Image: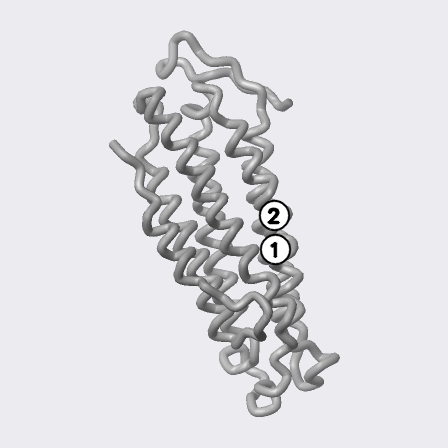
Amino acid sequence: MKLSFTATFTALAALALPVTAQLTEQQIVNAINAVATMSSNANTALEPLSTATAGAQVAAYSEALAEAFTGIITAVNSTIPALLATPPFTEVAQNVHSTRQTTPGAAVVAALDNFVAIHQALLATVIGKHSPFAQFALTAPIAAVLRILEAVVDSFAFALIAVIPTQATVPQLSSRAAHTISSDQAALQTAIGNTITTYNEVCIPSPLYPIVLPVCASA
């Protein structure tokens, strides 16, 4: 079986954001949704992996998963310069009410909520597939790329918070949106951290695999 992450890289190509121009709220939403699609595609591609999968195919899964995470990192990184060039959506905010549905930045927060849920599901799948990767000593590349993702998520969240109007820029608004982004950031960092901890474990391959799984301990 040949792994396919074509849809992942199609989503990456679809971003094509200007790196210095200011972004509209919809462009930011589209970028977040594209990365969410990449995470969903990676999750779907990884699901068939099991302890019954042959070693050579497990290696292919490991390589493809690392490539998928690299694509996600590239996509997220590509939005950060444009986000940093985008001021808070204050002009739009003056013409809306204070409800979540109409507040500037609400669509960004909703898209981020969705992305975090999808990416948490991917990371849960990655943790669940640890045994095959550990048996064939294939965890290190995955742990390495996850450490890069951990840093990128922080930069992305801080850049997003900067474009959300706050009471300081638009007095009639609450700071709920920025707090929600911070909560999403914390939740995602926890999920990434748990996955890194799992993939950093030192594992001894089992001679009776897959009946007996590899024995792993914290590094």
Q: Position of residue 169 (x, y in %)?
A: 71, 81
Q: Residues within 10 Å of mark 2 (few under 14, many from 20)?
A: some
Q: CA distance from mark 2 to mark 1?
A: 6 Å
User: At x 60% / y 52%, what residue is drawn?
Assistant: 153
Of residue 177 and residue 22, the one placed in the foreground of this image is 22
The crowding category of the residue bearing disc 1, from other C-alpha atoms within 10 Å (few below 14, some 14 to 19, many at least 20), is many
Local SS, label 2: helix
Residue found at x 33% / y 51%: 7
Image point (56%, 88%), residue name: 97
**What amino acid type is highlighted by mark number 2?**
Gln
- Say which residue label 1 marks: 185
Q: Residue furthest top?
A: 207
Read off the residue under disc 2: 189
**Of 112 and 34, which appears nearest the observer?**
34
Q: Position of residue 116 (x, y in %)?
A: 51, 55
> Seen in the image, is 184 located left or right of residue 49?
right
Determine the image quadrant of residue 53.
top left
20 versus 47 height, above or below: below
